[in-house]
Image (cartoon, rainbow, N blue to C red):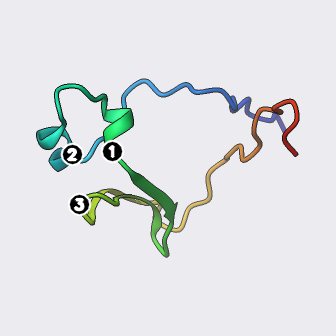
Amino acid sequence: MATRNIPITNKILLYLHCKLCAKSLPENMSMHEWAGYEVGWTKLGLQVWCKKHNTNIIHIDFENQQHPANITRKKIKGVI
């Protein structure tokens, strides 16, 4: 059985953002600085939540299917 190569580096092609954060973004800030999200597992799958506006950004239903995932991280010198 072949193992899929799931990278641990940032390969994001399209970012998800809260629509309310995008509308209220100050001119002198990036969305990276302005937004604050929580990401976690739910009974259905995975959810991204906006902490600033206390609202759902996306909730993905995996329909009881398991998917390959990579939960390792890059080793950082001096960090356990």
Q: Is 17 placed left or right of 9 in the picture?
A: left
Q: Residue furthest front?
A: 28
Placement of the N terminus among the 4 image quadrants: top right
Q: Tag 2 or tag 3, which sits nearer the N-term? A: 2
Q: Is residue 42 left or right of residue 52?
A: right
The CA span between labels 2 and 1 is 6 Å
Q: Which mark is residue 21?
A: 2
What amino acid is labelled 1 in the image? Ala
Instruction: Tell me residue 6's x, y (percent).
Output: 69, 33
11 to the left or right of 78: left
Three-letter amino acid code at the position of disc 2? Cys
How many C-alpha atoms fall within 10 Å of the one at disc 2: few (<14), some, or many (≥20)? some
Marks 3 and 2 close (CB-CB < 8 Å): yes
Q: Is residue 29 above or below residue 70?
A: above
* Furthest-bottom residue in this view: 43
Of 42 and 17, the residue lying toward us: 17
Labels 2 and 1 touching (C-beta < 8 A): yes
Query: Which residue lies under the disc numbered 1?
Result: 35
Q: Residue at image x 67%, y 46%?
A: 69
N-terminal label among 1 and 3: 1
Distance, label 3 to label 2, CA atoms, is 8 Å
Check disc 1: other Cα within 10 Å, few if <14, some if 14-19, many if 20+: some
The residue that appears at 55% across and 25% down in the rendered structure is 11
Q: Which mark is residue 53?
A: 3
